[in-house]
Image: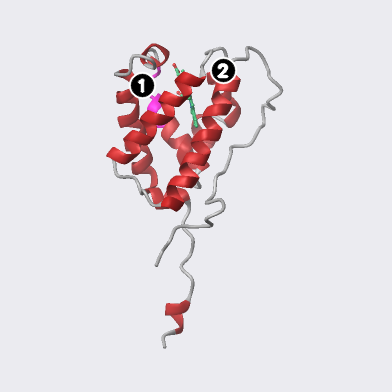
Amino acid sequence: MNPASSDPKPVPTLYEWAGGMPAFENLTAAFYQKVLRDELLEPIFRHMAPSHSVHVAHFLAEVFGGPAQYSAHEGSHFQMIQKHFSRHLTEQHRRRWVHLLLETADELQLPDDPEFRSAFVAYLEWGTRIAVLNSNTTAETGVAPDAPMPRWGWGEPGGPYQG
Ligand code: HEM
């Protein structure tokens, strides 16, 4: 018996399992096109910067275990939080945002295995609820300016099923 064959496969990061940076950049590019066609979300995102989509891609990639591109060059967790201040987002906005992102993930065929999707959705639920909370505050909210980037792992399933 080849001893190597019984070695457990290393657990990839969620970032790697999703398909790396191109997967995140394609996801947000297609997602924000959808957002701009959505009557509920379009007014909120009408004036977003051209770099918005790619910054969100890099933010998500970093959260899911990818390189620190967003926090090193494009912002910080606190700056991201500040972008949501005073936007007065509602639960309805949040739900539509999550719905369209997951619809785009399906269309672009991001991995749809139960382990990946449960971890992916868990972060989206957490992150979007934080965005809504922050959007309904105006000033410094008690969020420390040096708040670290969130890091998301596989959670209870522990990793993908790799046969
Ligand atoms: C996991 C959830 C979320 C993440 C990771 C996230 C991430 C980000 C990031 C990184 C930026 C800054 C982009 C830049 O530097 O240009 C941003 C801005 C923004 N986000 Fe979010 N966001 C989330 C949820 C939401 C939700 C649910 C909404 C509204 C439905 C929202 C609305 C906005 C708006 C309006 C801006 C400012 C856009 C502008 O520059 O005009 N975000 N977000």
Range shown magenta = 48-54
Dot 2 amino acid type: Ser
- Which element type, helix, strand or loop, lies under badge 2? helix
Question: Does residue 68 appear in the picture of this structure?
Answer: no
Which residue lies most toward the bottom here? 1
Q: Identify the mark at residue 135; answer none if there is no mark.
A: 2
Image point (59%, 15%), residue name: 136
Q: Which color scheme is applied?
A: secondary structure
Res 48 → quadrant: top left
Q: Nearer the viewer, residue 139 or 67?
A: 139
Q: Position of residue 45 (x, y in %)?
A: 40, 16
Q: Earlier in the sequence, mark 2 or mark 1?
A: 1
Q: Is mark 2 within 8 Å of ligand 1?
A: yes
49 drawn magenta? yes
Q: Is residue 112 above or below residue 6?
A: above
Q: Position of residue 7 (x, y in %)?
A: 48, 75
Q: Nearer the viewer, residue 33 or 121?
A: 121
Q: Which residue is mark 1?
A: 50
